[in-house]
Image: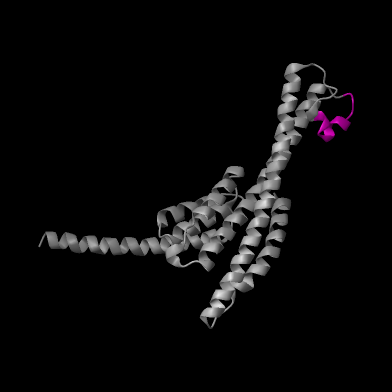
Amino acid sequence: VFVEKKIDNILWKVVYLELQPLMQQQMTSKREVSERKHKLYEKLFESIRFYNDFVNSIEEIITEKMKTINAAKESVQNSSNTAADPLLLSSSISSQPSNLSMSTKRKAAFKQLEKEIDTYHLIEAFQLARLGDLQRYVEKFTKQESEQSWNVAVDCYTKGLQCYPGIGQIYNNLGVIAYTLGDDFVSMHQYMRALSTPQHKFCAHENLLAAIERNRNAFEKLLKEFDIQYFVCFM
């Protein structure tokens, strides 16, 4: 997981370093605001296209590897001839000592291929998380608040969790969206899920505390209103 995450971080830094100046740049006129939005919009969608292509490439690799597994299963069922077993041919297991039984080689090859598929699913999940981030930036920095919709970002995050459910940054970012929409219960739930995963973002702790604080204030206000109404009823 460390290697996959490191690759993801390096790739994201290249993209984010180009986006950051456009997101933080101070504007003094409507024309500058319009030009900045246009540049940021173009850069965001260029990045989105890149990550979409990356995800599609990973899915193609996973599909091919799944085809190899399925072909190997059919080979075992239909024939006892293992010389051309597609599973063994696709792995490094075929180069192992010949004194290993064919059954042992097959099991080892299956495990190796399944491990490779899990790794690709993890890489895909990281990229879908980045796609979700980019879609959030599109809504936040290029649209008016009344026009903002977080559905595309949520879809990306959801697909990422389907690929690999142990990435805390996705739960954290879903919590951020819920917090933005004013749903404190869902945001707290997502932050807690983020903190329960090995791949969590440390900021999820601060985000959770912020949601609890806002929720506590609202709850205290509700209690005060309830006390006033209760007092009026019994006057």
Residue 200 seen in this snapshot: no
Q: Is residue 225 left or right of residue 158?
A: left
Q: For the magenta stretch, what is the residue range?
A: 88-99
Is 95 magenta? The answer is: yes
Residue 145 seen in this snapshot: yes
How many labels were placed on the picture? 0
Image point (75%, 20%), residue name: 76
State the residue in front, 14 or 97: 14
Is residue 57 depicted above or below 180 in this figure? above
State the residue in front, 97 or 30: 30
The x, y position of residue 181, in whole percent, is: 42, 59
Is residue 204 depicted above or below 114 in this figure? below
Q: Quadrant of residue 102?
A: top right
Image point (56%, 58%), residue name: 135
The x, y position of residue 196, in whole percent, is: 55, 50
Image point (40%, 60%), residue name: 182
Is residue 93 depicted above or below 228 in this figure? above
Q: In this view, does 70 lie to the left or right of 25?
A: right
Is 130 magenta? The answer is: no
Image point (25%, 64%), residue name: 224
The x, y position of residue 115, in whole percent, is: 72, 38
Q: Look at the image and tell me in which quarter the C terminus lies.
A: bottom left
Q: Which residue lies furthest to the left in this view?
A: 235
